[in-house]
Every structure is written in C-alpha cells, then in structure tokens.
Amino acid sequence: MIDKDSLPCNKPKRTPDHPKKSHVVKACYNGTEKIIRFGEQGAKTAGKPKEGESDKMKKKRASFKDRHGKNIAKGKSSAAFWSDKIKW
C-alpha cells in the first residue's frame, strides 16, 4: 500500500511489484492531492522521440496522443497526462 504522505507531489515513481500499473504519482493541483496509478506493466511504449526514429514508432506515439488527447488535456488530474509525460 502506498503511503500518500510519504510521496512527494508530482513526482512519478515506478512500481515494479504492482500487478497491473507501472507507475504511481501523487498529483497535487488546486490544493488537492490524488494518488494516480498509470501505465501498463511491461508495455513497450515509444519512449521519448529519438533521432532516426522508425516510422512505426512515430505512428505509435501519434496514435496514443490522438486516442487520449481529451484526457491528456485534463492536466495533472488524469492518468493519461502522466502516461503521456513519462511513458510517451
């Protein structure tokens, strides 16, 4: 169990022992704190753009951002925002 008080605000942390989610973050915004778990455990995400990146990875990244664009726009209160920032 994650102790909400021990986590720093807006600093994602890997959770290798969690059965489904790869990261957790205590999202702090507008005076509220919320624990958000995000990212599929063991997923092969595109990562940060790299020079000479394959077209397949570019399309994979663009597809994720198109599919989750509305939720990413919600900001720190959504798992999609954190997944986009950390994993894509």
Image (cartoon, helix red, strand yellow):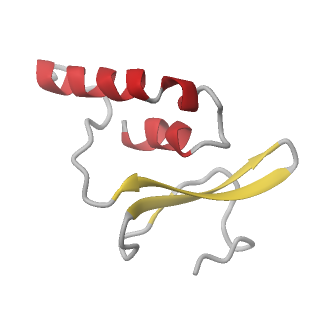
Q: Does residue 19 show up? A: yes
Location of residue 34 in the rendering, given as x and y in whole percent from the top left corner: 71, 57
Please give the name of the residue rendered at 25% of the width and 52% of the height, measured from the top-left corner.
43
> Image check: 32 left or right of 5?
right
Please state the horizontal and vertical placement of residue 63, each as a whole percent of the image. Answer: 31, 24
Of residues 51 and 30, the one drawn nearer to the viewer in this rendering: 30
Residue farthest toward the bottom in the current orientation of the protein: 1
Quadrant in which the C terminus appears: top left
Residue 12, percent from left and from top: 54, 55
Where residue 27 appears, x then y in whole percent?
68, 51
State left or right for residue 46 relative to residue 28: left
Compared with 1, 8 (above or below) is above
Counting the numbered discs, the total is 0
Q: Residue at x 77, y 56 (%)?
A: 33
**What quarter of the picture does the N terminus occupy?**
bottom right
Q: Residue at x 51, y 39 (%)?
A: 80
Name which quarter of the figure residue 42 lies in. Answer: bottom left
- Name which quarter of the figure residue 9 lies in: bottom right
What's the residue at 32%, 60% (across, down)?
Answer: 41
Q: Tell me: 20 left or right of 37.
A: left
Using the rendered image of the protein, determine whether residue 54 is visible from the camera's viewpoint: no
Residue farthest along the right direction in this orientation: 31
